Amino acid sequence: MTKLDEILQSLDASNHDLVEMLPANLNHKMVQKARLGKKPVPKHTQDLILQAVNALLREKAVTEDKKVKQYKRVEIFGE
């Protein structure tokens, strides 16, 4: 299980929820490959997924009136 998978499961979010955050740049295939973690994810894709995860976290925080941590690329994808 990858860190991205853990984060999305804790948020009870699907791949589609991430794609909705950045529909012009991100697609389901990119998210699925990153979530599985079998192959290295290109840095550009990592940045897009990171933006989508942080946007999703901000959206959930606003609806729940909570403060949430914003992730950095290294925390989710490693080096």
Image (cartoon, rainbow, N blue to C red):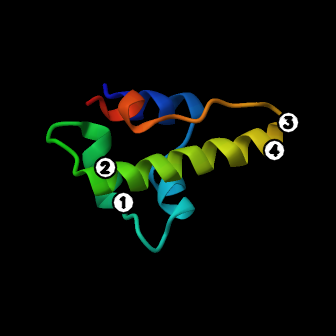
Q: CA distance from mark 3 to mark 2?
A: 30 Å
Q: Earlier in the sequence, mark 3 or mark 2?
A: 2
The residue beneath circle 4 is 63
Query: In the image, what residue type sits under mark 4?
Result: Thr
Dot 4: what SS?
helix
Q: Earlier in the sequence, mark 1 or mark 3?
A: 1
Numbered mark located on residue 32 in the image: 2
Q: Residue at x 37, y 64 (%)?
A: 27
Q: Earlier in the sequence, mark 1 or mark 4?
A: 1
Residue 12 versus residue 26: which sits nearer the camera?
A: 26
The residue beneath circle 1 is 28
Mark 4 near mark 3, Cβ–Cβ under 8 Å?
Answer: yes
51 relative to 23, above or below? above
Residue 68 horizontal/vertical position (percent): 69, 31
Query: In the image, what residue type sits under mark 3?
Result: Asp
Query: In the image, what residue type sits under mark 2?
Result: Gln
Residue 74 versus residue 8: which sits nearer the camera?
A: 74
Mark 1 near mark 4, Cβ–Cβ under 8 Å?
Answer: no
